[in-house]
Image (cartoon, grey):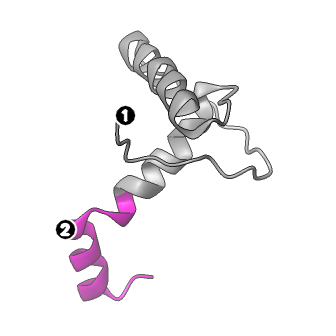
Amino acid sequence: MTKLKLGAIADEKPVKVMLELPAGLHRDLVTYAEVLSRESGQQVDHPVRLIVPMLQRFIATDRGFARSRKTSGAS
């Protein structure tokens, strides 16, 4: 079983986001959504829903960002 960094997606009120993704990144999101669906047992309807949790996870685990945030006093 694969250990993904992203867990189940919280069922929150959807937020509309408009952006362009490179085709390769979109394919990767689709594949990631398929793997996540198998691993978590929760169907990911739209791979775009992965973007926010991925960004949240990235920011939460970025040590350089955490240090910078701490020294600048930003919350």
What's under tag 1, amino acid-wise? Met
Q: Nearer the viewer, mark 2 or mark 1?
A: 1
Toward which corner of the image does residue 65 lie, by quadrant? bottom left
* Residue span colored magenta: 59-75
Give the secondary structure at mark 1. loop
Report the front residue among 18 and 27. 27
- Seen at 51% across and 19% down, the residue is 30
Decide if residue 51 is on the left or right side of residue 71.
right
Give coordinates of residue 67: x percent, y percent: 22, 78
Estimate how packed mark 1 is, as few (under 14), some (14 to 19) or many (20 or more) residues with alpha carbons within 10 Å.
Answer: few
Q: Mark on residue 64?
A: 2
Query: Helix, strand, or loop for circle 2?
Result: helix
Q: Is residue 15 left or right of residue 70?
A: right
Quadrant occupied by the N terminus: top left
Residue 25: percent from left, percent from top: 39, 20
Above or below 40: residue 22: above
Q: What residue sits 40% from the left and 20% below the top?
A: 28
Q: Earlier in the sequence, mark 2 or mark 1?
A: 1
Question: Looking at this view, is 39 or 28 the one in front?
Answer: 39
Secondary structure mostly taken by the magenta-highlighted segment of the chain: helix
The answer to whether 75 is drawn above or below residue 61 in the figure is below
Residue 70: image location, x then y, percent: 29, 85
Residue 16 disc label:
none
**The one of 42 and 21 positioned closer to us in this rendering:** 42
Q: Is residue 71 magenta?
A: yes
Amino acid under label 2?
Answer: Gly
Residue 9 drawn in magenta = no
Picture layout, residue 61 above or below residue 26: below
Number of callouts: 2
Q: Which residue bears the numbered disc 1?
A: 1
